[in-house]
Amino acid sequence: MNEIVRWCRIDTPLGTVRIVARGDAIAGVWFDGQKYDAVPDAAWRESPVDPLLRDAARQLQEYFAGRRARFDLALAPQGTAFQQSVWREIAKVPAGRTASYGDLARRIGRPSAVRAVGAAVGRNPLSVIVPCHRIVGSDGSLTGYAGGLERKRALLALERVEVDAAHDAIAAGPAHSA
C-alpha cells in the first residue's frame, strides 16, 4: 500500500513552490519547473489546510519576508545515505554564508568526492529549507542550482550575500535574524 503524500502550493517572490509532506515530516519543497522535481502519483493528495504544510508555508513566507533565517520543521527527504550526509552538511551552512562543494566533501569525510557531492546538492529535495543555494564553486562562482541561477542569486541577495555578477564572487554580509 502506498503512503499518502500531502502537498500544497504557495506563491513566493521567486515563483510558486510546492511543499510535500510524508507522515509527520516535510519531504520536499520544489519551485515550479525546477530540475529533479518529484512526480506526483495517485497517492498524492492536495491538502492546503494540513497543519504541517501550513506551518512550512508560514515559515517559508517568513523567510522570503526577511524575518526567518532557519527553519524549525521535521524533515524527511528521501535519498541515498550519501545524499543524506551531504544534505545534513548543507543544512549547517548559516544564512548569509556560503560553502563550496569541496568544503562539503571534506566535511563528510570524502574530500575526493567533489563531483558526487555536486550531484547530491543538485538532487536536494528541500529547496530553501536545506539551503543548497548557499553552495558555490571553490572560487566563489555560482554554479548550478536546480531552481535556476537567477533564483540562486535572488536567494543569496535576500540573505545579504553580495554576488559580483562579473565572476560571481561571493562576499558574506550580515544575515537576517532567525
Image (spheres, grey):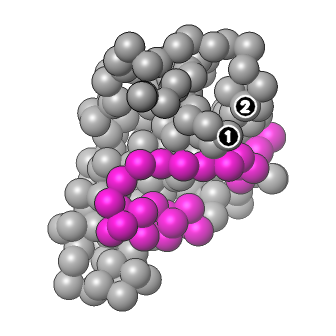
Q: Which residue is mark 2?
A: 52
Asked if one can make out residue 117 in the rendered structure from this viewpoint, the answer is yes
Label 1 packing within 10 angstroms: few (<14), some (14-19), many (20+): few
Which contiguous range is marked in magenta?
65-93
Residue type pointed to by label 1:
Asp
The one nearer the camera, 134 or 104, is 104
The one nearer the camera, 18 or 175, is 18
Q: From the image, which quarter does the N terminus lie in?
A: top left
Q: On the rendered structure, is 114 left or right of 65?
A: left
Label 2 packing within 10 angstroms: few (<14), some (14-19), many (20+): many
Q: Are marks 1 and 2 in contact (CB under 8 Å)?
A: yes
Asked if one can make out residue 170 in the rendered structure from this viewpoint, the answer is no
* Residue drawn at (67%, 13%) of the image: 48
Write down the quadrant of residue 148 in the picture: top left
* Residue drawn at (35%, 18%) of the image: 41
Q: Which residue is mark 1?
A: 24
Q: Is residue 35 magenta?
A: no
What secondary structure characterizes most of the magenta part? Answer: loop
In this picture, is 74 found above or below 81? Answer: above
* Residue drawn at (58%, 32%) of the image: 21
* Residue drawn at (42%, 43%) of the image: 125
Residue type pointed to by label 2:
Leu
Query: Residue 134 location in percent, x, y?
Result: 48, 57
Q: On the rendered structure, is 99 left or right of 21?
A: left
